[in-house]
Image (tube, helix red, strand yellow):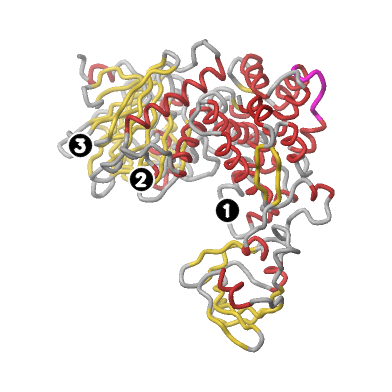
Amino acid sequence: MPTSRTRSTQAPVHYRVEATDLHARLFTVTLTVAHPQAQQELSLPVWIPGSYLVREFSKNLQRLDAQQGRRAVPLAQLDKHRWQATCRTDRPLVVTYEVCAYDASVRTAWLDAARGFFNGTSLCLRVHGQEDALHALDIASNAATAHWSVATGLAPQAVDRKGFGVYVASGYDELVDCPVEMGTFWSGRFTAGGVPHRFVVAGAAPSFDGKRLLADTRKICETAIRFWHGKGKPPMKSYLFMLNAVQDGYGGLEHRNSTALICGRRDLPRTGEARASEGYTTLLGLISHEYFHTWNVKRLRPAEFARYDYSQENYTQLLWFFEGFTSYYDDMLLRRAGLIDDATYLKLLAKATNQVLQTPGRSVQTVAQASFDAWVKYYRQDENTPNATVSYYTKGSLVALCLDLTLRREGKATLDDVMRALWQRCAGGPMTEADLRTELATLAGRSLDQELDQWVHGTAELPLADLLAVHGVALKPEQPQLAQRLGLRVTENHSVQVKTVLRGGPAEKAGLAAGDEWLGLEVQGQGWRIARLEDVAFYAGAATQVTAVVARDGRLLQLPLALPTPASAKAGPAGLRGRKALATTPDTISLTATDNAALGRWLG
């Protein structure tokens, strides 16, 4: 096998990454540019595709140094993430630097004595002018990591049995779209759609049932491949799942032929337990979601993302389609794969519906605006977020639901047909909203522009009850919890901490504010200490007027509060009172099957 030194000369851009200090959490990176420009510009991305927030990865770079042979090369910093090397063009430029890796999320980089993980956007400087040249990544081992293994979606060129060695990418985009997992992880393999798949899990407890995780994931993958291609071949040659099991965590980030996932350790399947826990079902939904992204956003992507600009925000109004429609299909594919039953699916759908109905911001911001504003709102949530914005994930999934049920009701097509037609129309590449509108009109036999204008570019309530009823599901109002009736979101730990005050509710009218500590209650001349929100109902009894005693900025405040009665209160301050849609879309709902045959035709 050729050595990495021999292979490195074949790649114009070569990175050597070594975990040099596990306790200091330092990766050392050596970048070699075989044919640099006289004023060679280098930069590190400020964001990672799939997570729409400027994260300033360059803050973790240190000790940058540039050399050509024995000659030091001047390296001038141009701004927060760009540098310029003044160098000769007839010899390689070698840049070395360190990266401190302390973020345990799927978005950046992590290193400690047990595990290493990184995305190229956090470690690999971009060589301007050579983004489309062959890139090589040499993952080096040392005494501290010799017992580790490596997993990545990059193509191996010269690696050892543990995965250390040289990998290649066709360009910078592919390099940074293939994260790397390092450590003593569990590993398993299966084949789906004729494609080899690998699943690695770090941090699992001894009770972890890897065999079951592989079997269930294989069902998901086979179902997704059939969805897009029938009996045809998927677009990737291999696929890698990387899962980090932690004490408490959840999330994922999609890549072209891999995904990085985080879950709670207790949510993994356990040996000897046949029934899927709620946490494990949620994990399967996450796996399904990120795998569906292999098609919907990584290949079929917004036209604005045809080529990523790593230096700044990349705006699109289509996240409601790419994230929302993926959110619609993630649980749907679990049902089609036989991993959940109808009742579980309807419970998951009701949960997503309630998340939207209990968000006052749905009447303030359209889901198209929410997509565009992701950079400053969705990823920077605060106490006012529920009042000012709506999630393009959950609202987008309900838009997909309504389109699918509308198409099925009219009997000419389904949303499945539309998704596959878009794949063919756009050749699995960039698409626009106009492409979606065209395929909807073609397959439905009529324009659905009015529906899209109202549901996506307007704030009209979605016709959920009517559409679900046609397909054998009843939408029923449920009595909301006290927090929702008051218009509050709180945490409870020996006292009630107010996180959010929802627009228009009794709590807002009383003057409660985010950050307040709700200490007690005065009722009919008596004072009571409360530790949980349920204490309010206990001590208030039949009273409808009480005084809330709260602490704010070191002061004690007495705030008159009108308590809504369960019979008269809808699900919240920004509910649907006074709207025509009230009879069909209450703020808190449950879903119940009324016609199993109709439901079966929908869920397939």
The answer to which of marks 3 and 1 sits earlier in the sequence is: 3
Q: Residues within 10 Å of mark 2 (few under 14, many from 20)?
A: many
Instruction: Residue 83: name its quadrant.
Output: top left
Q: Is residue 201 left or right of residue 496?
A: left
The disc label shown at residue 381, or none: 1
CB under 8 Å between callouts 2 and 3?
no
How far apart, in angstroms, are the residues tagged by discs 3 and 1?
A: 38 Å
CB under 8 Å between callouts 3 and 1?
no
Task: For residue 4, say whether it is visible.
Answer: yes
CB under 8 Å between callouts 2 and 1?
no
Residue pictured at 46% horizontal, 33% vertical: 287
The disc label shown at residue 145, or none: 3
Q: Nearer the viewer, residue 342 or 153?
A: 342
Q: Amino acid at mark 1?
A: Gln
Assign the C terminus to one quadrant of the image: top right
The answer to which of marks 2 and 3 sits earlier in the sequence is: 3
Q: Amino acid at mark 2?
A: Arg
- Range shown magenta: 443-449
Q: Amino acid at mark 3?
A: Thr
At mark 1, the secondary structure is: loop
Residue 237's place in the image compared with 46, above or below, is above
The residue singled out by tag 2 in the image is 265
Residue pictured at 73% horizontal, 62% vertical: 569
